[in-house]
Amino acid sequence: MTLLELDNIVVEFPTRRGPLEAVKGLSLELNEGQILGLVGESGAGKSITGAAITGLIEPPGLIRSGQVRLRGQRIDNLAPEKMRRIRGKEIGAIFQDPLTSLNPVYTVGEQLIDTMRVHLGLDHKAARKRAIDWLAEVGIPAPEARLDQYPHQFSGGMRQRVVIALALCAEPKLIIADEPTTALDVSVQAQILALLKRLCRENGTAVILVTHDMGVIAETADRVAVMYAGRLVEIGDVAQVIQDPLHPYTKGLMNSIPQIGNRDARLTQIEGAMPGLRNPAPGCAFAPRCPQAIDTCRTLRPIPVDAGSGQVACHLFGEAQ
Amino acid sequence: MFAFLLRRIVQAALVMLVVASIAFLMFRFLGDPISNLLPEDATVEERADLREKIGLNDPFVVQYGRFITNAAQGDFGQSYRNNRPVSDLLAERFPATAELVLVAASLALALGIPLGIYTALNPRGWISQGLQVVSLLGISVPTFVTGILLILLFSVTLGWLPSFGRGEVVDLGGWTTGFLTLSGLKALILPSIMLALFQMTLIMRLVRAEMLEVLRADYIKFARARGMPNRMLHFKYALKNTLIPVMTIFGLQLGGLIAFAIITETVFQWPGMGFLFIQAVNFSDVPVMAAYLVLVSFLFVVINTIVDLLYHVVDPRLRVEKSTARGV
């Protein structure tokens, strides 16, 4: 069942030199319980897309056009108070840095209890009991004692577990996880991802996993959406996109992952840099860096067409061929 | 906690010793006390007798030791001007200054914090912009100017409030208070406004800046993403973090209030310690000056120690770890 639909979302930041489009017409669908990896370089618009879904784009940024629908209901135009009730309760969020995501002057228990009381209408005692259960659930030893401790008394990995508990405690149907493991030790990353995946599978929670780490995607996601310069270039099942990428940009991304045990191979990289958001060229944004670019690419913007297990926006596919 | 307290007390004692030394040096460099103590026509013998009697001929170290020993017991000798014990004079004047500072500090906090929060939460509103401009005036206009303007408006033009003195006071076993009479309360209004104005604007601007900073913090963003209501976000999650630095500055400023009371007390002829000090300066009444210096420093040290202790109450990161963070 479709849980979330993004319908041609345009996110714009007004600046002194005119508006800047960070997301330029993005459409996606996410089913219940599905884990979608959202990948791309820095500045591709991944995090902004996440913020657009939760309605937390920093002003003066705004959703210029398009719709965000949760179970068919539009949520991008809700009054702030209505949207607040959806945040945490329907759509949770996990941010990059567990060290700064927790309020330093309140115990982790208090933060969990507050969150559950706000959304679930529990009394203090019941909320406290559930908070202990949640800490146990995310694998924190001695949860009853840990509940009354402050964030600084936890290690980085433990804090990210607490953050996951906080994001999940009001039982949202969707979690936006924005680079949830980037700030963590490599040895802890896999544990946190496994935990997130297990909890979401158990509770039927869908996840949008924003990352630039293909390894994380391969481990965790069901589907992958690749973004480039504010647009979706390819979306498909994780196995297909990783084994057999269609878009030249996705191919470039896959080739730039180092292969273990292949010391002699030179690491390929995509030449050039992503174009700035200002003064976009008329054609495909990737054309200047694309090894397979044809003349059409520089003049006509490709629209997404069905290909592989999903869609791809490239002139090498679809009716142009 | 005990070790911390002990360390702070030792530090405080050292600071007080240094201050007492400076106070002692004043005696040696601010003229000859004998000429102040005796009439101008005193003979050379009389002068020499007195010099011997009050111990000015003793070696430096003996005099220093005596001064410190006496000061530690609250004995600063006789005032040259009034020929009364300095400790009595200060004890008489202390309630006036204490009440003035108390009212001014409460006023500064009670208005400064809410206004700071308001301007931080509505940074673009015209009320906030107006408050910012007014607060700039409050910070930059010298306090004696505001004091004189207050007198001009409320005492001279409107005739509502007295321009000098404490009004009627009630003696409560050595502590004279102006809180219990109408004229005492009316007399408090203008001086405490003058004294509070600078502190209030400072606190307001500080709270605003800290709050804006805290509202950008990741833990506030995360709390917002969890759908916490604004009321809880602002007044619970953000405010406590905001108040930690505000507390430090206010602790320092409270000492400053006592010191700045000198100017307010002079403008309003307020019979407090600061006014006493100014009179003492005019008369080179060194024992009073020395005692005032030591007392104000003592209050500074006490307030700062209390603020440090309060940190531990507000900020859990400073508390002694009962259990250390374990690995993943």
Image (cartoon, rainbow, N blue to C red):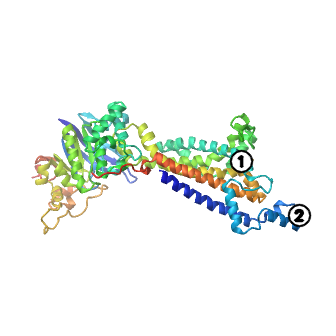
Residue B301: image x %, image y %? Answer: 59, 54
Residue A66 visible to an observer of this rendering: no
Residue B98 appears left or right of A9? right
Residue B82: image x %, image y %? Answer: 80, 53
Looking at the picture, which amino acid does disc 1 mark? Ala
Name the one closer to the observer, A319 or B46. Answer: B46
Name the one closer to the observer, B237 or A49. Answer: B237
Quick one: label 2, few (<14), some, or many (20+) residues within 10 Å? few
Quick one: label 1, few (<14), some, or many (20+) residues within 10 Å? some
Is A56 situated above or below B27?
above
Chain bearing mark 1: B
Please identify the quarter of the rendering in which residue B65 is found: bottom right
Chain bearing mark 2: B
Looking at the picture, which amino acid does disc 2 mark? Ala
Q: Are marks 1 and 2 on the same chain?
A: yes
Q: Which residue is mark 2?
A: B42
